[in-house]
Image (cartoon, helix red, strand yellow):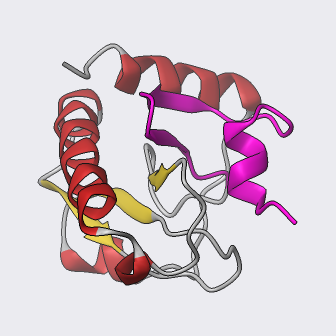
């Protein structure tokens, strides 16, 4: 059975898509810990990040770097934090979180709430800043 993220990639479930290419997909986390919190995934469904083949793993990291640079331009922050966590969805993914300090990245218990319109605005802001 396809993972939730594969269903997003296939367009079966809506998402706030930030960017995609033939192998990777980036979209806003709908339970963000910060404005602009983005998930980056390979389109190839593999549960565990370190089970990805080397080419897919390296490509995912390079794609995430491109998204992070656009995210930093779009959302005022000190840095964009990178975190790999989450056991709920069996599909490798990277969290990119705009942060002012380490606490912003480490506090996943306090979720932010945005309206659909705000999510759309954030999506466009980030997408427009990706080179």
Front-most of residues 65 and 122: 65
Residue shown at 66% from the left, 76% from the top: 90
**Left or right: where does residue 7 sit relative to residue 40?**
right
Direction from residue 10 to residue 23 in the image, left or right: left
The image quadrant that residue 82 belongs to is bottom left
User: Relative to the observer, which residue lies in front, 42 or 126?
Assistant: 42
Q: Residue furthest left?
A: 78
Residue 12 in the figure: left or right of residue 60: right
Q: Between 122 and 66, which is closer to the camera in this rendering?
A: 66
Q: Residue at x 63, y 86 (%)?
A: 87
Residue 16, position as x, y percentages in the image = 63, 32
Q: Is residue 77 above or below residue 72?
A: below
Q: Is residue 85 above or below residue 82?
A: below
Quadrant of the image containing the C terminus: top left
Image location of residue 48, percent across then percent down: 49, 81
The stretch of residues the image draws in magenta is 1-30
Query: What percent of the width, then of the height, locates residue 81?
Result: 24, 64
Which residue is at a point 74% across and 36% down the rendered structure image?
A: 10
Q: Is residue 16 magenta?
A: yes
Q: Quadrant of the N terminus?
A: bottom right
> Is residue 122 visible to the viewer in this orientation of the structure?
no
Give the image location of residue 79, x and y in percent: 14, 55
> In the figure, residue 17 lies in which quadrant?
top right
Residue 60 visible to the viewer: yes
Q: Is residue 55 left or right of residue 123?
A: left
Q: How many marks?
A: 0
């Amino acid at each position: 059975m396809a993972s939730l993220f594969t269903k997003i990639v296939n367009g079966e479930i809506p998402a706030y898509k930030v960017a995609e290419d033939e192998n990777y997909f980036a979209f806003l986390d709908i339970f963000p810990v910060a404005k602009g919190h983005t998930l980056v995934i390979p389109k190839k469904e593999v549960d565990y990040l370190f089970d990805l083949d080397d080419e897919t793993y390296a490509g995912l990291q390079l794609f995430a770097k491109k998204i992070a640079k656009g995210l930093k331009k779009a959302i005022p922050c000190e840095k964009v934090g990178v975190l790999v966590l989450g056991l709920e969805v069996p599909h490798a993914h990277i969290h990119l979180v705009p942060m002012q300090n380490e606490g912003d990245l480490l506090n996943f218990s306090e979720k932010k709430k945005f309206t659909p319109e705000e999510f759309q605005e954030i999506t466009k802001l980030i997408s427009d800043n990706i080179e």
